[in-house]
Each structure stands twice: as C-alpha cells, then as structure tokens.
Amino acid sequence: MSGLPVSASGKGAWEVAIQAAKEAGDIIVARFHSQKQVVRKGRGNLVTDVDVLCDEAIVGIIRREYPGHGILTEESEGVTSDSGYLWIIDPLDGTNNYAFGIPFFAVTIALVRGEEILMGLTYDPLRRELFRAEGGGGALLNDSPIAVSRRETVLTSLIGFDMGYDDEGGRQLLDMATALWPRVHSLRVMGSAALGLAYVACGRIDLYCHRWLYPWDIASGILLVREAGGQLTDWGEQPVNFRSTALVAANGALHREFMGLVGEAAGRR
C-alpha cells in the first residue's frame, strides 16, 4: 500500500486500522445487549460508556503504533502533531441506535495528510462488514469491489438522511422529505451517517444527505463514496472535504436531479 506510513512496530497502516476497528467492534458487540451507562451531551445527543471504552482502545493502538501522528476523535481530547498526518476516529457512530438497541452502528477510522484523505474504514461489527477505501484504489466491502447505484431518478431511488443535532438543519431535512414525497421510491432516517455513506458506496441506498456533521462522521465515508464512483457536494453544490458540515452523496446523474428538485422546492416556499 504505497504512500501510507509504516507503524512503529513495522505494521502497515491498514493492519493497524483494521486491528483497532475490530477491537472496538468486539467491545461494542459484547456490550450491545447489556446495561449501559448513558450520558446526555445535548438534545438527542447521547454518549455511553461503550463509546468511551472503544475510544480508549482505538486511540491506545494508534498512539502506540504512530506516536508522532495527530488524532481527532469524538469522545476524547485530540492529539496535535506537526507530522502532517491526522487520524480521525468515531469509536461508535450511531450511538442513539446503539443505546436504544437498534442494530445499526459502526466504527470509523480515517487517515488524512493535510487536506487529503488517504484511507478510510467503516466497520459494522454486528454484520462483520468492513468497508474500506484508499485514494486511487477503489472501494471494497470485505475485499470485494463496490460501486454506487446506477439509478438516475428519485422516482425509483431509496434516499437516506439523518436529522442531526442542529434544530434548523433538521427542519430543513424534514422540509426536503415533504417536498420529495411522493416523487421518491422511499425515504430512510438512518441513524448513522457513517453507514449511510457506506451504503451509498455499495449501492444499498441511492443517495444520502445531511445538514450538520463533524469530521469523524464523514471522513471515511467521503473517500468510500468517491472511490465507489459517486459524487459528493454540499447543499450549495460545492465540493466537500472532511471538515464540511453538510453533504449530499449519490451517483452524478441522481445527484443532479435531486439538487434540481430541492432547488425547485426552495423556490416555491
């Protein structure tokens, strides 16, 4: 895997990332049906003791193998570095699903250098599905190549979105859903942006959109969708990066039609 840094123990970056994701995944699965300690960070925004345990496991591995690299993670203080490398981690994306017993959540790990996402991994530990992509190397699900869907119209498409924690962004997405219905095959509120993007990358859903996101939600998914042949922009149709707070992801033709319909609906209001 050229261009990716070798770890302190001589392991490749993929070996380290997959080990970290699977160790966290084992914790998540082991605790899924047991009692959890839940803390409310804000309206609709929860964190469990499992999030924290998984964060500790992943960050511990990354710091041991790449002591000079930066770390940005949802559940603990980050690590700064002048190396140019930054690991972006969500130890448990879909915490609300997890806390309520809904089996739809994931671990995400991405490595960036400067503004470039070098590699991205999204791991669903219940289904043992490992989505991964490396810049210029395509996207894979458990080592099999994946691609975005070819549907070109919302009339036949399954569209996923999430409300997020921003009230105005959530209202805008509800307005979007109302405007599209019933001119869309169906709509899904996913509960995990990471899996929403992974499912676009493998063609399970045709389009995913969100209005309020963080780097750990999307760094892996952006690369997955790009390497699977998809298109991502913000709601102003500008390119996105891992610091973007909103996005729309689909194949190019569906993306164009969707943005046109959303624009028409906004003009009618």
Image (cartoon, rainbow, N blue to C red):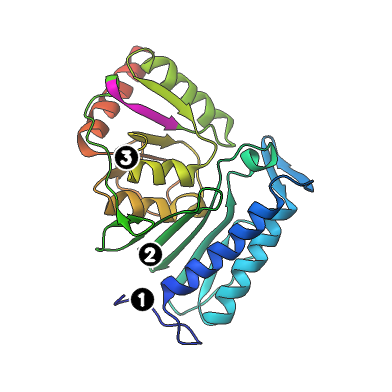
Q: CA distance from mark 2 to mark 1?
A: 8 Å
Contact, mark 2 vs mark 1 (Cβ under 8 Å): yes
Residue plotted at (36% across, 27% down): 158
Is 159 magenta? The answer is yes
Where is residue 89 shown, x and y percent of the image? 54, 60
**Tag 2: amino acid:** Met
The first of marks 3 and 1 along the sequence is: 1
Marks 3 and 1: which is nearer the front? Answer: 3
Where is residue 26 shown, x and y percent of the image? 62, 59
Q: Which residue is mark 2?
A: 119
Q: Which residue is mark 1?
A: 4
Residue 166 shown left or right of residue 122 in the figure: right
Residue 38 shown left or right of residue 244 in the figure: right
Vertical side of 198 occupied by 189: above or below: above
Vertical side of 224 occupied by 2: above or below: below
**Tag 1: amino acid:** Leu
**Few, some or many residues within 10 Å of mark 2 (<14, 14–19, 20+):** many
Secondary-structure class at tag 2: strand
The first of marks 2 and 1 along the sequence is: 1
Q: Which residue is mark 3?
A: 203
Q: Foreground residue, 103 or 73?
A: 103
Residue plotted at (56% across, 45% down): 105
Residue plotted at (59% across, 37% down): 165
Residue 57 shown left or right of residue 81 in the figure: right
User: Which portion, as a residue range, is magenta?
Assistant: 156-160
